[in-house]
């Protein structure tokens, strides 16, 4: 039965000619060649290489945070509130006298952790549900209706509701960011599984009496890996943004975490006095998300050259 | 056609039902006793029991769901825990600014993004095309609150052209009303323009290789007419689809934008409700936003036939 979210009019299928690469969404393309060889070649040139360099720098900052001239990002110093940049505090201090530079540098750790955590969790859970939906007819109808329902709820609102109900902690925020991302992974995996099911080599494997776990793990799931890497990259970007939005709105990580969103949330009251409280974390956040998105686009194009020609 | 519309309408019922189940489940299945959350930390065991009975929490969960659904269908979204005011009434009071912001953003986006996408496709590979595409990648990555504060710093504080924050209803006159909507509209539409310009470009490029475009050019149709009447017209279906799908982004964006610019709309109401843990209000707003999203996508589906008469049902 068609639903408003993935409905396709009669006489035309979603795949041809109206399949479009949505920004932030991988296509369920299965290529005959080694996708990762293509990935590697793409990453060596153009915008993707710049994005990789930029992300490398941010990862470096996150890993080496204690050695980059930072002080304790949560050390409060009431005597030094809202100071403009000095030799001691390179980017000034916030309303509690905490060093803004250190907070922004340490903030990269939280953002990258949230991005990575949400990407891994949603891909793992989505892969499991997607394989079941793609392989078990009976489960398919039910699972996909549930996914339609989740997708109909705007993701920020769903995440806000989940955090506000279960209380803010790193784990609940991570789960709240992950859940709205799962349906897209499920749809992607299900699409790939449905396609490879009718491939001659899979039919051959079935007729040879291959056991189900082997059939799934060796012959079907490997096809999902490349598109999942692309989708995971987009989830990484989107999770970092969502965490910042949640924290900015006051429904995110507890305030003792110096995430970029939290720095901006606390800076809101003083933004006329100290624009840096919003600008510095904002710049880091934008560059990180930009880098990840550019990387995702490049990998998607490498994976699906037919689609890339259109772009 | 009528049968089709009726069928599509019926097909939204399971999705709406599923949304209701999920929203109900979120409140009931998350760890913690809803009665304890509502009663607060100081409540005694008797008070808790009373609240539980009052809310129907002593009944089996499926009966609770049926009762709640019955209320919903009668348009009863419950009562705010904080103010005791019906949630439906609160929504009606606050919907004005959100509606104004969303409308203004969609209109602005379509006016800006369609020409940008068409021009980029027409000038494919040139510097202009690259600039538009770079903007679209960049605009998609910069969070709304960063864009919003940059606009405030530059136009309100620096140049003093607009009030910093706040909202005036239309009744106060058009300019005072619109003056306070311009920056929020710009901030919110950045991401939306980026999305739609990019899809417009892709869809136009897709149809530019078709035979009828070559035919139109061969018979001497002006290039602008080729682009708008032949290419854009045929690219309308995917563009409409994206405008529908992008609504989810727009709704999330409204929540953030209203917080940045202090607009007293539904987005602020969500944040206020979250900070006050006013669950009936959160629940009601999520349901409302989801239903709006579903209805808009239904409308887009039905519009397909208008854009592309080849689609018959």
Image (cartoon, coloured by chain):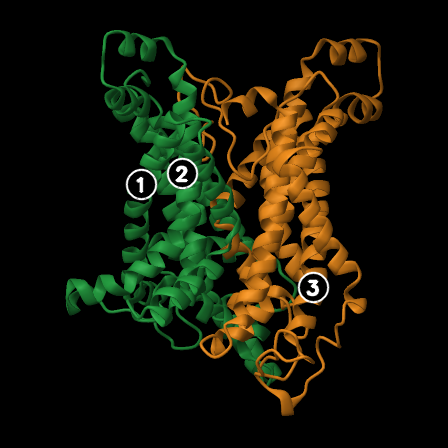
Chain colours: A orange, B green
**Quick one: SS at disc 1?**
helix
Q: Is residue A130 above or below residue B146?
A: above
Query: Circle 1 marks a residue in which chain?
Result: B
Q: Is residue A105 left or right of residue B94?
A: right
Instruction: Tell me residue A10's x, y (percent).
Output: 40, 18
Circles 1 and 2, Cβ within 8 Å, touching? The answer is: yes
| Residue closest to the eye, A127 or B90 | A127
Gap in Å between the C-alphas at discs 1 and 2?
Answer: 8 Å
1 and 2 marks on the same chain? yes
- How crowded pointer 1 is (Cα within 10 Å; few <14, some 14-19, many 20+) is rated as some
Q: Residue at x 29, y 56 (%)?
A: B99
| Residue at the disc numbered 1 | B110
Q: Residue at x 57, y 76 (%)?
A: B49
- In the rendered structure, find residue A245 and report the number of the disc placed on it: none
Query: Circle 2 marks a residue in which chain?
Result: B
| Residue at the disc numbered 3 | A170
1 and 3 marks on the same chain? no
| Residue closest to the eye, A269 or B131 | B131
Q: Residue furthest bottom?
A: A79
Gap in Å between the C-alphas at discs 1 and 3?
Answer: 39 Å
Which mark's residue is nearer the viewer, 1 or 3? 1
- In the rendered structure, find residue B196 and report the number of the disc placed on it: 2
Instruction: Tell me residue B246's x, y (percent).
Output: 43, 42
Instruction: Tell me residue A79's x, y (percent).
Output: 64, 92
**Quick one: SS at disc 2?**
helix
Total numbered circles = 3
């Amino acid at each position: 039965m068609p639903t408003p979210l993935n409905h396709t009019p009669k006489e035309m299928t979603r795949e041809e000619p109206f399949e479009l690469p949505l920004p932030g969404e991988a296509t369920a393309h299965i290529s005959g060649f080694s996708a990762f060889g293509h990935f590697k070649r793409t990453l060596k040139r153009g915008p993707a290489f710049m994005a990789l360099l930029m992300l490398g720098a941010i990862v470096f900052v996150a890993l080496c945070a204690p050695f980059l001239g930072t002080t304790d990002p949560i050390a409060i110093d009431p005597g030094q509130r809202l100071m403009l940049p000095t030799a001691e505090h390179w980017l000034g201090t916030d309303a509690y006298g905490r060093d803004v530079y250190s907070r922004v540098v340490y903030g990269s750790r939280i953002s990258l952790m949230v991005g990575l955590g949400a990407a891994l969790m949603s891909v793992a859970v989505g892969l499991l549900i997607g394989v079941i939906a793609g392989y078990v007819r009976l489960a398919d109808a039910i699972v996909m209706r549930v996914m339609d329902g989740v997708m109909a709820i705007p993701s920020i609102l769903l995440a806000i509701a989940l955090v506000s109900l279960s209380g803010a902690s790193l784990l609940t925020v991570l789960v709240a960011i992950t859940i709205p991302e799962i349906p897209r992974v499920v749809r992607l995996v299900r699409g790939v599984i449905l396609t490879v099911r009718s491939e001659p080599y899979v039919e051959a494997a079935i007729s040879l009496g291959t056991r189900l776990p082997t059939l799934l793990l060796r012959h079907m799931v490997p096809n999902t890996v490349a598109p999942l890497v692309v989708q995971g990259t987009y989830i990484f970007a989107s999770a970092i943004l969502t965490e910042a939005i949640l924290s900015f709105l006051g429904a995110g990580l507890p305030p003792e975490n110096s995430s970029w969103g939290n720095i901006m949330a606390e800076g809101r009251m003083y933004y006329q006095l100290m624009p840096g409280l919003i600008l510095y974390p904002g710049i880091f956040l934008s560059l990180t998300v930009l880098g990840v998105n550019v990387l995702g686009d490049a990998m998607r194009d490498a994976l699906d050259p037919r689609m890339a020609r259109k772009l | 056609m009528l049968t089709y519309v009726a069928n599509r309408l019926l097909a939204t019922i399971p999705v709406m039902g599923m949304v209701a189940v999920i929203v109900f489940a979120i409140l009931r299945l998350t760890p913690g006793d809803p009665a304890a959350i509502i009663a607060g930390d100081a409540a005694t065991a008797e008070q808790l029991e009373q609240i539980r009975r009052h809310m129907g929490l002593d009944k089996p969960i499926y009966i609770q769901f049926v009762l709640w659904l019955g209320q919903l269908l009668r348009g009863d979204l419950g009562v705010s825990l904080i103010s005791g005011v019906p949630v439906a009434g609160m929504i009606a009071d606050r919907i004005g600014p959100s509606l104004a912001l969303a409308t203004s953003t969609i209109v602005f986006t379509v006016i800006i993004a369609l020409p940008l996408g068409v021009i980029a496709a027409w000038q494919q590979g040139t510097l202009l095309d690259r600039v538009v595409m770079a903007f679209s990648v960049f605009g998609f990555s910069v969070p709304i609150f960063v864009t919003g504060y940059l606009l405030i710093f530059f136009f309100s504080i620096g140049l003093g052209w607009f009030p910093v924050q706040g909202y005036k209803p239309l009744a106060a006159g058009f300019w005072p009303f619109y003056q306070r909507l311009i920056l929020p509209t710009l901030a919110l539409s950045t991401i939306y323009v980026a999305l739609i310009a990019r899809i417009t470009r892709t869809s136009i490029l897709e149809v530019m290789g078709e035979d009828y475009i070559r035919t139109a050019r061969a018979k001497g149709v002006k290039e602008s007419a080729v682009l708008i009447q032949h290419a854009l017209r045929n690219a309308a279906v995917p563009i409409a689809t994206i405008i529908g799908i992008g609504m989810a982004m727009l709704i999330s964006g409204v929540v953030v934008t209203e917080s940045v610019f202090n607009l007293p709309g539904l987005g602020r109401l969500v944040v206020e409700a979250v900070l006050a843990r006013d669950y009936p209000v959160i629940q009601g707003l999520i349901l409302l936003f989801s239903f709006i999203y579903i209805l808009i996508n239904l409308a887009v589906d039905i519009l397909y036939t208008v854009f592309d008469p080849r689609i018959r049902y």
